[in-house]
Amino acid sequence: MKKLFVCTTCGFKGYPKKKVKGSILTEIFLWIFFILPGLIYSIWRLNSKTWVCPKCGNQTMIPADSPVGQKLTS
Ligand SMILES: [Zn+2]
């Protein structure tokens, strides 16, 4: 069973949306022409992966079973 999340900004209940900065095309381009920048770019993209609220786009999704989440959902 997947964990439910709640947004502390808009109160949306559900699952957060995965958001990755940068683009896959830039990554491929860098990998083809410059191996090292491609590697750095890939690492940067992996580290910049965030979960955002699908409704308001804020990074304020918290687990619904956390103390604050329970307060918001009840
Ligand atoms: Zn929200």
Image (cartoon, rainbow, N blue to C red):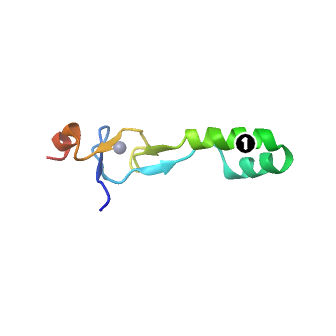
Is residue 6 toward the left or the right of residue 36 in the image?
left
Q: Quadrant of the N terminus?
A: bottom left
Per the image, the residue denoted by label 1 is: 39
- The residue at 32%/37% (across/down) is 9
Is residue 68 toward the left or the right of residue 60 in the image?
left
Residue lying furthest bottom: 1
Indicate the amino acid at tag 1.
Leu
Which quadrant of the figure has residue 45?
Answer: top right
- The residue at 71%/38% (across/down) is 40
Quarter holding ligand 1: top left
Characterize the local packing of mark 1: few (<14), some (14-19) or many (20 or more) Cα atoms within 10 angstroms: some
- The residue at 44%/51% (across/down) is 17
Which quadrant of the figure has residue 2?
Answer: bottom left
* Percent x, y of residue 54: 41, 50
| Mark 1 element type | helix
* Percent x, y of residue 64: 25, 47
